């Protein structure tokens, strides 16, 4: 008997199954990323986004379509991380705008929902690029529209044809983006979207979702775990956070949670009291620990450090839970202007605070802060007008989304793609000027800043005709890779040389947590000798993953 509609109960099952499929395959999707840098990757960002919505859905008791739509839309919106996560949240949000008005979903309704999803997602991206998750989502809608116009009423046949076309569009993404074709991979965001759709369709058919990982290995045949082992560290990331408990966390929960952490890492410390749980784990996938923790409550004080060259483990100390002990302060007068900046690394954060930033959000490459994190920071600074500096191109969409959601605060997002751009923007804020003048001035100033960052490759690949081996150091500029090699200092120096021109006068070097002061001083001296006409500054950034962040302006 043909299935002609979907009710709220079935849609809930489909959504949870799609999220589960994505969750199980996130590491494989991460490996599809073209850039071989140890960042918070597409699979992780998309999974954390959809799992925020899963949490909302799981809290509902026999929801109707309206309540279910609200849970999916709100949860994914607030949990959105990174560009891929924001786009996924917008696809879900657009779809939910349509289905919320119906008790049952038919093929015409589903087609309308697909159309609204694509429209909403494209609008969220300032410069949409084809060959990405956006193209795949558009392909799904175009096939749905074709079948709807043909009068197809069987849901099974409809989804079978739509998914087959989506898989085909995904397979063509390398033909649209040369960098994908060169690396021999499809778009990772598009793959993540298709995993959600495949899982949802399996639930519609009453099947168990196939959670096995495809045999195909992108770029290199070595997994993230193997990469870390090659650096003589079994678990490469020191991950710390506090869970602000929202559910019961008794002895059984604590034992189960520790057992889960042991399955993904070592050096585990879990200290719990009535209101919070402090967690420390060394793992190759911090997202898995964070994801599990989200089942018990909200997270704060998140910190992820790369341990490639660390020789001692850091023991975790219980932080004072001031937020739960402090009494509400008397009515506070609104400040006229405040600043919120995303930063990573102790030194970088101190620099922003020293420049007058009211709230520093810990985040960046290894863990993109969510829309909700940014929105909470905006509200906490208690100001009429708030400037937000994302300081990472993968966080700009989440910041823009927070701006749209802020109801009582005038939010101005300065689209800073790097921390040096953020520092330059704040330095150029002039209190005597009005908001529009300052926004225009800061947007102009960040264009003058050139940024280079030194990190390491986690796999073999070829990018921009540069052959990169696993473990090589890479100097990455604003528009691509500037230097590659096995000597970190030489790579950093060559990167600076490729950044410079005759108009630049100031070079700022921020050295990371894995670099010694002596090594950083030697690099500074070498650059000063090469560019005697420039002022060269050296500061401790403390950032993980990136040994050096260098700006020239």
Image (spheres, rainbow, N blue to C red):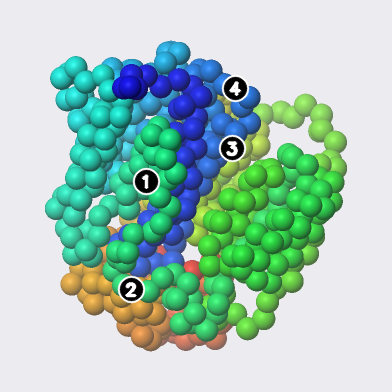
Please tell me which residue is depicted at 23% across the width and 68% down the height of the picture: 463
What residue did someone put label 2 on?
221
Instruction: Say the numbered circle drawn on residue 186.
Output: none
Estimate the x, y position of residue 78 in percent, counting from the top left. Answer: 53, 36
Q: Does 370 sit left or right of 529 as displayed?
A: right
Q: Which mark, residue 55? A: 3
**To which quarter of the image does residue 287 belong?**
bottom right
Identify the residue shown where x is 14% and y is 53%.
Answer: 175
Task: Please give the residue where the numbered disc 1 appears in the rendered image.
Answer: 195
Task: Tell me: 347 left or right of 549.
Answer: right
How far apart are labels 2 and 3 at the CA level? 34 Å
User: Can residue 149 be seen in the rendering of this structure?
Assistant: yes
Q: CA distance from mark 3 to mark 1?
A: 19 Å
Q: Residue at x 59, y 22 (%)?
A: 62
Give coordinates of residue 505: x percent, y percent: 35, 67
Of labels 3 and 1, the one closer to you: 1
Task: Specify which label sits upstream in the sequence, 3 or 4.
Answer: 3
Q: Earlier in the sequence, mark 4 or mark 2?
A: 4
Mark nearest the camera among 4 and 2 is: 4
Quadrant in which the C terminus is drawn: bottom left
- Along the line of sight, the residue nearer the viewer: 389 or 137: 137
Question: In the figure, 41 relative to 106: above or below?
Answer: below
Quadrant location of the N terminus in the rendered image:
top left
Circle 1 sits in a helix, a strand or a loop, which is it? helix
Tell me the residue that label 4 is attached to.
Answer: 62
Alpha carbon distance from label 1 to label 4: 26 Å
Asked if the residues shown at circle 2 and circle 1 are in contact, with their CB atoms under 8 angstroms apart, the answer is no
Sort mark 2 into few (<14), some (14-19) or many (20+) by Cα contacts within 10 Å. Answer: few
> From mark 4 to mark 2, how far is it between C-alphas?
45 Å
């Amino acid at each position: 008997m043909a299935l002609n509609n979907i009710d709220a109960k079935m849609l809930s099952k489909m959504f949870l199954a799609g999220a589960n499929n994505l969750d199980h395959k996130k590491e494989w999707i991460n490996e599809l990323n073209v850039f071989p840098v140890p960042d918070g990757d597409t699979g992780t960002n998309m999974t954390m986004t959809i799992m925020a919505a899963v949490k909302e859905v799981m809290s509902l008791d026999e929801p109707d379509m309206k309540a279910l739509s609200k849970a999916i839309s709100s949860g994914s919106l607030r949990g959105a991380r990174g560009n891929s996560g924001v786009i996924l949240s917008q696809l879900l949000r657009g779809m939910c705008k349509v289905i919320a008005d119906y008790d049952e979903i038919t093929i015409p309704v589903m087609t309308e929902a697909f159309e609204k999803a694509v429209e909403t997602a494209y609008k969220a991206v300032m410069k949409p690029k084809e060959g990405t998750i956006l193209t795949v989502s558009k392909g799904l809608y175009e096939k749905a529209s074709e079948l709807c116009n043909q009068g197809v009423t069987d849901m099974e046949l409809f989804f079978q044809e739509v998914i087959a076309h989506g898989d085909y569009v995904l397979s063509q993404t390398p033909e649209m983006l040369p960098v994908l074709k060169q690396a021999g991979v499809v778009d990772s965001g598009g793959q993540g979207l298709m995993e959600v759709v495949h899982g949802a369709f399996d639930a519609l058919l009453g099947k168990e979702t196939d959670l096995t990982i495809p045999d195909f290995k992108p770029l290199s045949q070595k997994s993230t775990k193997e990469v870390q082992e090659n650096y003589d560290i079994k678990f490469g990331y020191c991950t710390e956070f506090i869970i602000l408990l929202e559910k019961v966390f008794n002895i059984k929960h604590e034992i189960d949670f520790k057992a889960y952490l042991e399955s993904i890492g070592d050096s585990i410390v879990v200290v719990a009291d009535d209101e919070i749980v402090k967690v420390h784990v060394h793992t190759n996938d911090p997202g898995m620990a964070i994801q599990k923790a989200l089942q018990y409550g909200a997270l704060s004080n998140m910190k992820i450090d790369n341990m490639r060259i660390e020789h001692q483990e850091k023991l975790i100390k219980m932080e004072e839970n001031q937020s739960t002990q402090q009494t509400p302060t008397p009515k506070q007068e609104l400040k006229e202007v405040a600043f919120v900046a995303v930063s990573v690394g102790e030194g970088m954060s101190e620099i922003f605070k020293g420049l007058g930033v009211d709230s520093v959000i810990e985040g960046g490459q290894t863990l993109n802060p969510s829309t909700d994190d940014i929105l909470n920071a905006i509200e906490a600074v208690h100001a009429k007008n708030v400037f937000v500096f994302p300081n990472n191109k993968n966080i700009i969409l989440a910041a823009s989304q927070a701006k749209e959601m802020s109801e009582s605060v005038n939010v101005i997002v300065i689209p800073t793609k790097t921390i040096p751009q953020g520092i330059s923007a704040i330095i150029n804020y002039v209190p005597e000027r009005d908001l529009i003048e300052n926004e225009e001035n800061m947007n102009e100033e960040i264009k003058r800043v050139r940024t280079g960052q030194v990190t390491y490759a986690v796999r073999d690949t070829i990018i921009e005709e540069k052959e990169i081996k696993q473990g090589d150091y890479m100097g990455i500029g604003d528009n691509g890779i500037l230097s590659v090699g096995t000597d970190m200092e030489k790579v950093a120096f060559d990167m600076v040389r490729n950044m410079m021109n005759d108009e630049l006068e100031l070079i700022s070097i921020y050295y990371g947590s894995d670099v010694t002061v002596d090594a950083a001083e030697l690099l500074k001296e070498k650059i000063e000798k090469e560019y005697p006409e420039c002022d060269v500054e050296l500061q401790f950034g403390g950032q993980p993953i990136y040994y050096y962040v260098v700006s020239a302006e």
